[in-house]
Amino acid sequence: MPMTQSAQEISGTLPIFHAGSLTGTFAKINSAFKESHPKVEITSTPAGSVTAIRRITEENMECGVIASADYKLIPQLMFPSYADWYIIFASEQIVLCYNEKSKYHDEINAENWYEILQREDVKFGRRNPDQDPGGYRTLMVWQLAEKYYKIPGLYQGLLNSKGDVLIGGNVRVSDLDYTFSYQAPAIQNKMKCMTLPEEINLSSKRLEEYYAQAKVELKGSRTGETIIVNGEPILFGLTAPKNFRNQNLAIDWVNFLFSSEGVSIMEAMGMKPIVPSIANDPNKLPDALRHMLSEF
């Protein structure tokens, strides 16, 4: 694994902003990284990916590495002022989580989940789509479900359901019967989860064109501005913001993430690493990271 200098010699503070769904995985990655980089201090800040990026671009918070649950947010919200490259490092899927106290958990399945969620006494949660890709991807899952199950009005039926709640503030996952989540954090938190059909769970490259039928309108960076996001396979991406002064440290951390140890940690935490990785423009990628691409 290429290093700009000896890992033992590299020092400094590395602020990492990342999607909340990466909290468990990155805690393991950071702990392993510090074993080989004893002089480095890592601060790790989880948030919805949109919120995390806006802390950099609107609040001018210092960040060495930003990891987004939707790689497209990096060029949409950070190019060209704050970044000009990104790497796609993992794929995911949306699952429906529940527990032993969830109402009707003993009868829910891939063919009736949408009917159970609309029952009067059921509460189900999703993330805020203007803050978190998991939130707008859940809405995409509902749109695709309407087409897959051939039930006109299903999307609006779920959206307007009495039990539909946004997670956050005073609403905790433990207060709900069901929640839509990425698979890896569900596995890490030992939650029961139901796999949704491939046609709606946003996991398959083969179904990329089919997923594109779904679209969600989000708030833009400026007042009154909106962004349209189309459905596509879930891919996580990262970059090192241009204005971070210790680029060598950020690059070393990214290299570690793609090392055999880093990949093993991601797999053990339920993630699906993409190795070799994919970059938007290999020519803009730092030299020390180009080795991780399949071709250059």
Image (cartoon, rainbow, N blue to C red):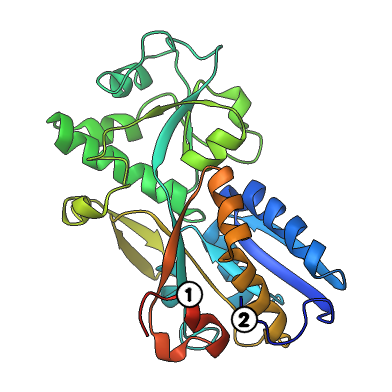
Q: Is residue 69 above or below residue 296?
A: above
Residue drawn at x 56%, y 27% as measured from the top left: 191
The circle drawn on residue 2 is 2
The quadrant of the picture occupied by the N terminus is bottom right
The type of residue carrying mark 2 is Pro
Q: Position of residue 37 (x, y in %)?
A: 80, 70
Q: Position of residue 160 (x, y in %)?
A: 34, 32
Mark 2, secondary structure of its residue: loop
Q: Is residue 142 visible?
A: yes
Q: Is residue 141 left or right of residue 290?
A: left
Q: Is residue 144 above or below residue 71?
A: above
Frontmost residue, 265 versus 43: 265
The circle drawn on residue 191 is none
Residue drawn at x 30%, y 24% as measured from the top left: 114
Residue drawn at x 34%, y 35% as measured from the top left: 159
Q: Within 10 angstroms of label 2, few (less than 14), some, or many (20 or more) residues? A: some
State the image quarter where residue 229 is shown.
bottom left
Q: Is residue 59 left or right of residue 162?
A: right
Q: How many discs appear?
A: 2
Q: Position of residue 196 (x, y in %)?
A: 32, 32
Q: Is residue 156 above or below residue 136?
A: above
Q: Please say if the residues under marks 1 and 2 sit with CB atoms less than 8 Å apart.
A: no
Q: Is residue 129 visible?
A: no
Q: Position of residue 279 (x, y in %)?
A: 41, 76
Mark 1, secondary structure of its residue: helix
Residue drawn at x 36%, y 27% as measured from the top left: 161
The circle drawn on residue 292 is 1
Residue furthest to the right in view is 39
The type of residue carrying mark 1 is Met
Q: From mark 1 to mark 2, how far is it between C-alphas?
A: 10 Å
The quadrant of the picture occupied by the C terminus is bottom left
Frontmost residue, 131 versus 181: 181
